[in-house]
Image (cartoon, rainbow, N blue to C red):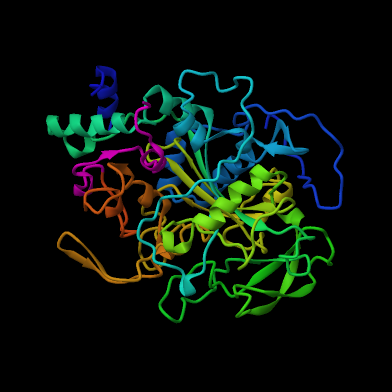
Amino acid sequence: MRVPSRRFLSLLLVSFAALPAAWTIPVQGQTPPPRAQTFQYADFPAGLGFPADENVLLGYVNQQDRRAVREHAWMLWQGITAPSGSIWNDQVLPIFDTWFSATEVFDDRYAGRDPDVPGRRFTRHLEPPRQSGHSPAAPGGRSAAVMSFVKLNRDAARFIWDHDYYRKDTLDGLVDFYNRADAPLYQRQIAPFPRTAITLKIVFWLIKGAESPQSQAGLTALPYWDPSYPPPPDGGLPMHTNWPNCVAVDPAGRYAPGSRQRVNCNGTPKAPRYVDAPVIGLDRFYTYRLSDADDVASVADFLKDLSSAGGEQERLVADAGQSPEIGDYLALMAIHMTTKELDNWTFQTFWWSPTPDAAPHADYRPPGVQGVWRNYLMCTAYDMETPREPDGSPHVCFNPYLESDLGPTASYQVGDQTYPPDPMAGHRSNCQTCHARAGWPSVSDDPFTANYGRVFNTGYLAPDDPYYAGLVKTDFLWSLIFHSQPPRQ
């Protein structure tokens, strides 16, 4: 076991250069001009105020200056979505698409290598998201295709490599060290990430190519979130598989945008549920085209192997009976973004909407956010409690494409406390409160492990809360828990 150094223990005691242009998306039937393939890491652009001074951000939080917090979060969005210098499959990549996937950071273990080493290829590693370990099957047992990605900027990736936090034995060693030292709960943590660290969780949805016989006359029905949705009448989970409204995504531009077309929205081939849905062009999304057999195989693995019964959190569905094909698209639906600008990190989460200018989630979006990136709404959680909700409860910020279905549908017990069913709990969740519960060892049935945190918005969680008994806090990052690897043989 590696014993932490004095410097490490001392840390524990310290409790665009250019504006982004409008985006051009290749559309079926059009041949983009050939451009050279080039791919290299691009960092967050200078001149956008990142990283911000922690005291300034804390001032915004303490003064409950909603506008200042949102303007900062939108600036972060503007930065990660700015065009990079990389081009892949004739598409200019946004900066975040040049960052490191969880597979690169944890599986490939590039520790000690220059992140810009020649030969690093652009890839989107499809992986099972593993945050939720108790969600029941979706109504009717409908399968769900998960297309989720974790991305880390270079400073976050290097920190994990330099501290061997991609290894399970490193985390196990810290647990053992703190247990033997009988360390106070507030000290049971890894070293803090640098202020410039950024992590992302990214979610896509499968859009069928217009020529595919699996499409609906060239269209794909896409359920979308509306905050006015009532709770499901049967007491089930509110989730994309039962949202009543859809848009009809038209990848080839065959229909007039805004016109109404009849599509099967959250139905099945045997039991269709038809709605007149507004037509939305592919130019309203950031998309990735499935261009070869490897792309198709990656998505097919998700369609085949993962379902809502698998207990995964970020579930996004293809229409029933669909399978991926060359010429299909993955459309970006959500990005959950954290930055280490605060000790407790900043949390902002973004999601696609057919009404992207709707208040309050579009408020204060700056003109520097351009092109397809203006089709995404946002909420922030820079504090576990404030600004409080109108009823006095802790602050709520959740991503409808990520957290809608977090609520338990059956009662459960933790210690001596019994909690009732609460299917709508995800709609009252707070990103920071959830991530504050991130701790090693990994998810298990033991009440003092990561899955203990099933009460999703109980407000402030102190660093010495009894929850942390037996755990090592992973600096608000679940990715260390879910992606760390055993030693290489």
In the image, residue 164 lies at what x, y percent?
A: 37, 26
- In this rendering, the answer to whether 299 lies above or below 242 is above
> Is 67 covered by the magenta stretch?
no
SS assignment for the magenta stretch, majority: loop
In the image, residue 154 lies at what x, y percent?
A: 52, 28
**Measuring 75% from the left and 57% from the top, which residue is drawn there?**
209
> Is 481 covered by the magenta stretch?
yes
Q: Is residue 371 visible?
A: yes
Magenta segment range? 463-489
**Measuring 23% from the left and 21% from the top, which residue is drawn there?**
3
**Measuring 30% from the left and 53% from the top, which residue is drawn there?**
451
In the image, residue 372 lies at what x, y percent?
A: 71, 50
Q: Is residue 196 visible?
A: no
Observer-nearest of 288 and 425: 288
In the image, residue 380 lies at what x, y percent?
A: 49, 51
Observer-nearest of 56 and 350: 350
- In this rendering, the answer to whether 36 lies above or below 392 is above
Q: Quarter-wise, where is residue 387 in the image?
A: bottom left
Q: Quarter-wise, where is residue 245 in the image?
A: bottom right
For the N terminus, the image quarter is top left
